[in-house]
Amino acid sequence: MSAQNPVFIPGPTNIPEEIRKACDMPTLDHRSPKFAKVFKPAVAGVRRVLQMEAGEVIVLPSTGTGGWEAAVTNTLSAGDKVLTARFGMFSHRWIDLCQRHGLDVQIIETPWGQGAPLEAIEAALRADSAHEIKAVLATHNETATGVRSDIAGIRRALDAAGHPAMLFVDGVSSIGSMPFDMAGWGVDVAVAGSQKGFMLPAGLAILGVSPKALAAMEHATLPRTFFDFRDMTQAYATGGFPYTPPAGLIAGLAASIEMLEEEGLENVYARHARFAEATRRAVAAWGMRPCAATPELYSDTVTAVVVPEGCNGTDLVQLAASKYGMAFGVGLGEVAGKVFRIGHLGMLTDAMLLSGLAVAEMCMADLGWDVRLGSGVAAAQEFLRTSGNHAIAQAA
Ligand SMILES: *Cc1c(COP(=O)(O)O)cnc(C)c1O
């Protein structure tokens, strides 16, 4: 029995015991056929989770940020134009990465709490009659504000404008926890990381790459070596890896996908939607609101809670850590202090979620915020006990 509380940061997430054990393996000779036995099921599983058809899965020893870098360096050249919107810390960081690589980033500034602005994106694509925009970048789930963007809508905007740009999607905090349809949405590069929906330690960037992006790779001149998809795909074809792979993490990835599919991906997504709704009911009972401006923007994996005037969300996060040993997310960038974040993704049960809401409430009371103890917990309890699939919680 571990005395550690569950974490409520939006990644890294709680690591289930089965996955921790799967990562803990004896040294493996990665040039032996044993490696392919570990690697192939992981790659095949990622393909199913991403709902990929054609194209390649790339697994890199890195994190989500490295996945962003791999996406752009493998497909673009210095000076290429990309189109994106900035509406939170993660969309901002991807923009910053692109700019540091010498890309010409056309940025649609969007208020934090909003998602990718479809009309403005379509207008920018229509205005680009010379087709200078090589890629549209989208953050599926903006982890800083708890906002989900409509990726299918961006695909429709591209198609409506008759624009051939590639579509790159950061799904680091959505993939494995929220529906993701790479083929259906026509995504050219999807980026995930191991430590969020896949419930693993940090250490892998996981990408889905479409045939169109693979073709772009042949002409792209941004420098890359460690992240070069050409080396990866060549080695994969023979069941190998171009350098020493983090075999334990890859074994863990296969175990993670096995767990997700045992529950059923649809059930996994429904569980996250339930937890998000339960969390929002608690937030409403506290007299607060999510940072996401409207219900269709609500994330299923993280809720950024706007704290009342005169309160500081970071105080709550610090007190929760120091007094109760529980981790919540602080507000980042523009919303620093104005929100605190409750991550509700990965390995989580009804009972675990309630413990987080209860501790958040105790911190509010300790800080003298005008919140009645039990109010948010009761609202979440009422919702959780009357909704959803409790068999999963019992199995856990
Ligand atoms: C966590 C996260 C990242 C960054 O991932 P790292 O693994 O920390 O490099 C990127 N995008 C989103 C949306 C995230 O939530």
Image: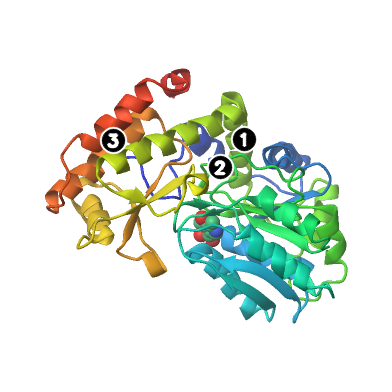
Beta carbon at label 3 within 8 Å of ligand 1: no
Q: Work out how far the residue at label 2 is from the one at label 1, CA to CA, in angstroms.
A: 7 Å
Percent position of residue 386, x then y: 38, 20
- Quadrant occupied by the C terminus: top left
Residue on which the image places disc 2 = 198
Left or right, 165 with reference to 29: right
Q: Work out how far the residue at label 1 is from the one at label 3, CA to CA, in angstroms.
A: 26 Å
Q: Residues within 10 Å of mark 1 (few under 14, many from 20)?
A: many
Viewer-nearest residue: 93 or 7 = 93
Viewer-nearest residue: 190 or 372 = 372
Answer whether residue 145 is visible to the viewer in this image: yes
Left or right, 148 with reference to 360: right
Percent position of residue 68, x then y: 64, 63
Residue on which the image places disc 1 = 257
Q: Residue at x 87, y 67 (%)?
A: 218
Question: Disc 3 or 2, which lies upstream in sequence?
Answer: 2
Question: Disc 1 or 3, which lies upstream in sequence?
Answer: 1
Beta carbon at label 1 within 8 Å of ligand 1: no
Q: Work out how far the residue at label 3 is from the one at label 2, CA to CA, in angstroms.
A: 22 Å
Q: Amino acid at mark 2?
A: Phe
Q: Residue at x 30, y 38 (%)?
A: 282
Q: Residues within 10 Å of mark 3 (few under 14, many from 20)?
A: some
Residue on which the image places disc 3 = 355
Contact (CB < 8 A) between labels 2 and 1?
A: yes
Q: Residues within 10 Å of mark 2 (few under 14, many from 20)?
A: many
Q: Secondary structure at mark 3?
A: helix
Percent position of residue 323, x then y: 18, 50
Asked which quadrant contains residue 357, the reply is top left
Viewer-nearest residue: 107 or 318 = 107
Q: Residue at x 74, y 38 (%)?
A: 44
Contact (CB < 8 A) between labels 3 and 2?
A: no
Of tags 1 and 3, the one toward the viewer is: 3
